[in-house]
Image (cartoon, coloured by chain):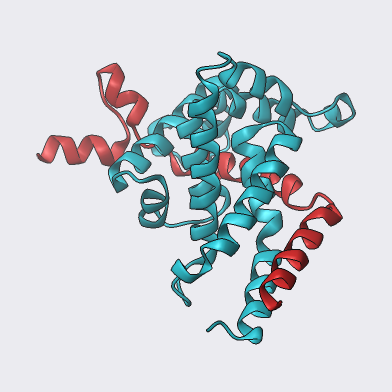
Chain colours: A red, B cyan
Amino acid sequence: MTAKCLNELEGSSTDADSKADATVPLEVQNQIGKQLREVYGKFLSEPLPDKFTVLLTKLAGDQKK
Amino acid sequence: MTSELDIEEFQRDLAALVPNLRAFARSIAGNPDHADDLVQETLVKAWKNRASFAPGSNLKAWLFTILRNAFLSERRKRKYEVADQDGELSAQIAVKPEQTSHMDMLDFQQAFNQLPQDQREALLLIGAEGFSYEDAALMCGCAVGTIKSRVNRARNRLVELLGLTAEAEEMLPSRRAAG
């Protein structure tokens, strides 16, 4: 139990399976997070085609009738 | 029963989340046209089922769940037709050559695309969208521990693919183990 907790805290273990599951250092986590948000942010800020507004207006319009 | 104000509010709330739905769809589906189809399907389903949405609860999580289910059920159906899967999708998500000045970003995106779908999704929900592990687990219909494990696996794989460890350790001046 204690050993398991320690392994978890240190993010280190011997067998391959737990290694894949191990917690990566916080610094690396932050680095990954930053790059991930950059890529995702690029998707988020893409110009929005009209079709979504048109669809939502149509859905709302159908409802009001 | 639903008042007009509710409808307008719901419409506004949905519209505000379209960019997030598109980004999420792009990340899991790859192809932009396919992603937009998924978003449209999600909006229609959300509208039809809005009575089942509990006001005050997390609308984004609810919408992401609808989108995810639409994606998975589509993929399940398609599995019998073509053995497409991640290979083709990953190739399509790759950014265009004009982006090559952002070498890190390109590398990251390529590495990210190599992750299994469940890991990509878990990492996105936690790392980019900022959902709690609990919300992500609800959305993916699995245990909190499973999400944590997928996120860890995704990070470890990225570390491997991007060779992040060494670089990161150099960036840590006060790392005791290194000194």
Task: Answer above or below: position of B168 versus B11.
Answer: above
- Residue closer to the observer: B110 or B141: B141
Q: Which quarter shows the C terminus of chain B?
A: top left
Asked whether A61 or B42 is in front, the reply is: A61
Residue A51, image x, y percentages: 82, 54
Q: Nearer the viewer, residue B125 or B69?
A: B69
**Res. B5 image quadrant:** bottom right
Looking at this rendering, what residue extends furthest in the front direction? A65
Q: Is residue B151 above or below residue B112?
A: below
Residue B138: % across, % down:
37, 53
Q: Is residue B60 left or right of residue A2?
A: right
- Point out residue B38 in the picture as x, y percentages from the top left corner: 64, 43
Given the current orientation, which residue lies at the most extreme left position?
Answer: A1
User: Left or right of A65: which side holds B167?
Assistant: left
Q: Is residue B80 visible?
A: yes
Residue sitting at 53 percent across and 67 percent down?
Answer: B50
Q: Residue at x 71, y 69 (%)?
A: A62
Give me the residue at 28% from left, 45% from top. B143
- Position of B32 with respect to B179 (left or right) is right
Count every numbered label the image shows and give the total: 0
Left or right of B35? Residue B60 is left
Outermost top residue? B83
Residue at 54% in and 42% down = B70
Residue A22 vs residue B45, the one in the foreground: B45
Where A5 sits versus B2, above or below? above
Residue B104's image quarter?
A: top right
**x, y percentage for residue B148?**
36, 42
Is any atom of residue B115 visible in this view?
Answer: no
Q: Compared to B5, does B145 lie above or below?
A: above
